[in-house]
Amino acid sequence: MNTITRLYYIDWLRVIAFGLLFVFHSFRLFDTYPWHIKNPETSISINYIIEFMHSWRMYIIFLVSGTGTYFALKSKSENFLNGRIKRLIIPFIFGVIILIPPQKFFEAIQQSGFEGNYLTFLRLLPSALINESYGWNLLWTG
């Protein structure tokens, strides 16, 4: 019988990497670089932390994600695609429908001077995304 030994240091590396991802994005409110939403008070000291973390954070996330994919393929390759759809596509769709519109609403208020209410914004959002009215475009989607 072939048993797979769990590598707990990979689990902890994943916890640390995604914890730092949360810290990184929380700090982005306070650095001086352009971003979605900014705090009126920014700090150059935060810039140094952001630059340090930005230089290696995505490499660690790709490493732990790739390692997880490797072990998932190794242990249950016949159900891999179905499992990935359930675990990744469904949360992705939830995020696009539920989490991104409020973020874009506050971004439009702060960066573009939008003065309407949230329902008006939701009605205008599809055309605004295509026309780049709120400082965002579809280029990153490929």
Image (spheres, helix red, strand yellow):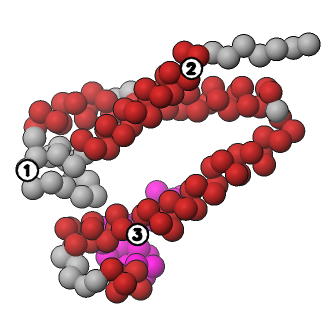
Q: Is residue 90 left or right of residue 121?
A: right
Q: Sequence order check: which comes first, mark 3 or mark 1?
A: 1
Residue occupying image coordinates x 40% and y 33%: 19
| Residue 11 covered by magenta stretch | no
Dot 2 amino acid type: Ile
- Place of residue 49 in the rendered image (x, y in percent of width and height, measured from the top left): 22, 30
Counting labels gives 3
How far apart in space, not on screen, are marks 1 and 2 (Cα)?
A: 37 Å
Residue 95 versus residue 49 in the image, above or below: below
- Residue underneath mark 3: 101
In the foreground, 124 or 133: 124
- Residue underneath mark 1: 41
Dot 1 amino acid type: Glu
- Place of residue 30 in the rendered image (x, y in percent of width and height, measured from the top left): 17, 46
How far apart in space, not on screen, are marks 2 and 3 (Cα)?
A: 34 Å
Q: Sequence order check: which comes first, mark 1 or mark 2?
A: 2
Q: Sequence order check: which comes first, mark 2 or mark 3?
A: 2
- Residue underneath mark 2: 10
Q: Is residue 70 visible?
A: yes
Q: Quadrant of the N terminus?
A: top right
Bounds of the magenta segment: 125-142
Residue occupying image coordinates x 67% and y 17%: 6
Classify residue 69 by image quadrant: top right
Residue 31 versus residue 119 in the image, above or below: above
Residue occupying image coordinates x 31% and y 37%: 23
- Place of residue 108 in the rendered image (x, y in percent of width and height, measured from the top left): 27, 71
- Mark 1 and mark 2 residues within 8 Å of each other at the beta carbon: no
Classify residue 63 by image quadrant: top right
